Image: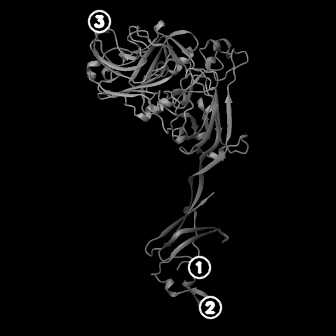
Amino acid sequence: MAGVFKSLDQSDVRITPFRTYKLWSDVIENNLSGSIYTIYQANYNPIANYPMVDVLDDNFDQGSIYFNQFELTTANGKYQRVVHSSLEHLYYRDFYTNNKASFGSGNINTQIRYLEDQAQVVSMPQPKFGEAILPGSVLMNMSWSYAVNSGSLYSTSSVTTASGVWTVVDDFHGNLVISGSGYYSPYGQFVGGAYTNYTSSVDKIAVGEWPIDTIYKYANAGLVSFTSSYNRGDWQMESAYNNIRVSFPAGTAAPSASAVELLGAIAEFTSANSSSITIKTDEASEYNDLYNFQGKPYAISMFVRPTQIPTQPSGAVLLTKHGPAEELRVDENGNVFSQPVNNQFPYRLRYTTDQKIAFEKGSGEDSLFSLTSSLALDINKLYHIVARQSGSLMSLHINSADGNSINTATSTLSDRSCVNLANTFIGNNYSLDLGFDGFIDNVKIYNKYLDQTEINILHHTLGVGNVNVGNVFYNHGMMALTSIPSKYATFNTIETRGTHTIWETEISCTIGPGEFTRSSNPSLQEYNPEQNQYVFRSFVTGSDFTPFVTSIGLYDDYYRLVAIGKLSTPLQLPNNVDTTIIIRLDR
């Protein structure tokens, strides 16, 4: 039998890191006092001599005549305040309108965000979040309330206030999203009056988006014409904006307009000015597999507000892929030649004289398939339109998230007979004689078939398609809410988990076969009158004795007990091999 104690040397001791997560939860009082979270409300205030002082009005951004006139400059002539955008959470100064030229042709435009003039920043001290906030652990409860636009672009109806509650969580990738049953779009009443709850965003990637966010630079500049490029993998093209007006959907009360509002800066089309957006899809490679969607599912989503009933008998074009009877092409030797094209198109959305929407495709002068909505679009009211096709089934949705018009039909034309080499047009046709009068915004084309849930999300986010309200910076213990709706929200509760590394001391205690140290079990001992003390019974010292270990004691050099390790269950020691028990001490 071994002695009562076993000596340990340095080889038995090692120090290892152990990661743990601490939950921090706090109720945010009105005065923010006593909270472990610090909340900052950052505002940019224009200088006093600006013509207007609305901090949310991005007429003061670079490219605006007000900005150029009144914004202070640095010593090297740069504006002191510039617009910032971000790609993959990295912000850069937005001096360019052509992302393709600025950043190359790679697929980097996965998510473009704009840095607001206002933001709510939540910060926690480092001892709380430790090395990082644990991804997936953010949970915030927020209340929102504000005065609703009255008589604005959105609607002719007047609502005094709107309010609700959000549950905000992170998506493991640094995005803060509205989740659970708490997502009530503050803009819902403008597109039908019904609130709907959603827990996710549209995860299908659009292969085309117009108008682009950067058109706000042309706001309040009258009729403008300019070009922009769209670059997302193989879906690369240039778009020409012709004779459109860019404006903000400002109302008479908050929320005021800004460049990153859900509708943002939008394009106004007028038939008298031959307004149009030309999407040069004929420059895309493999055109039959791309914007013709030959035999493949696709969906088109847009928001439309007509301001005038079409005067042309054929109505007004909202979107079409259509071209002239002849096209000029260039052969492999650089020679220009004329190529006849049939009057055919794979899709067309048209606003008719009876104020309905027609979803059409054609394979020639006398071959036209048309699916017409049962709902008529009132003047000066905003509508969400979704047209989609899968196989031969075509469907047309007008505010379908509110239970309104859904029309379906089976196409009698083959997709192959409707393809062409033409460009795609928004707000007009190629001959500029079917112009639309009104606003068109957040046009998105998907090479996937949107389901009803995704259509509902697009509807209640005015075509944006996600419920992001900001970002969490895990390694810095900070959260920034920069969306327009979040400006009108108040924090109620915040909960996160902090990542902390605890350095543990590991001590290896090895017990040889047949050894044991000490036991407090009285059945192992008997009284020896000759020695006048208790001694171990004879069977304890035999080789067949295999006791159970329940605890390990650690002693210093002065034989003082400094730690004791309790086993969760008794451990029986084998009599043929060593047994090593590891004790961990946190420090």
Q: Is residue 137 visible?
A: yes
- Left or right: where 579 falls relative to 334: right
Q: Seen in the image, is 437 located left or right of residue 320?
A: right
Q: Give the structural element (helix, strand or loop) at label 3.
A: strand
Label 3, residues with CA under 10 Å away: few <14, some 14-19, many ≥20: few
User: Which of the labelled discs sits on residue 121, or is there none?
Assistant: none
For marks 1 and 3, give the one nearer the viewer: 3
Q: How far apart are the two marked residues, 1 and 3, measured between alpha carbons?
A: 103 Å
Q: Nearer the viewer, residue 189 or 56?
A: 189
Of helix, strand and loop, which one carries label 2?
A: loop
Describe residue 410's horizontal placement relative to residue 258 as left or right. left
On the image, the x and y values in percent for residue 466 come to 50, 32
Q: Which residue is under mark 3? A: 338
Give the residue pinned by disc 1: 520
Sooner in the amino-acid sequence: mark 2 or mark 1: 1
Query: Residue at the spot x=40%, y=31% of the render?
Result: 450
Residue in view at x 34 percent, y 11 percent: 323
Image coordinates for residue 138, horizontal then vertical, percent: 57, 43
The tag earlier along the polypeptide, 2 or 3, is 3
Amino acid type at mark 2 = Gln
* Callout 1: SS: loop
In the picture, measured across the screen, residue 586 lies left or right of residue 231, that is right
Question: Mark 1: few, some, or many residues within 10 Å (few <14, many ≥20)?
Answer: few
Colour scheme of this structure image?
Answer: one colour
**C-alpha distance separating marks 2 and 3:** 121 Å
- What is the number of the mark on residue 531? 2
* Quarter location, residue 480: top right
Find residue 386 and report its horizontal and vertical position in percent: 41, 26
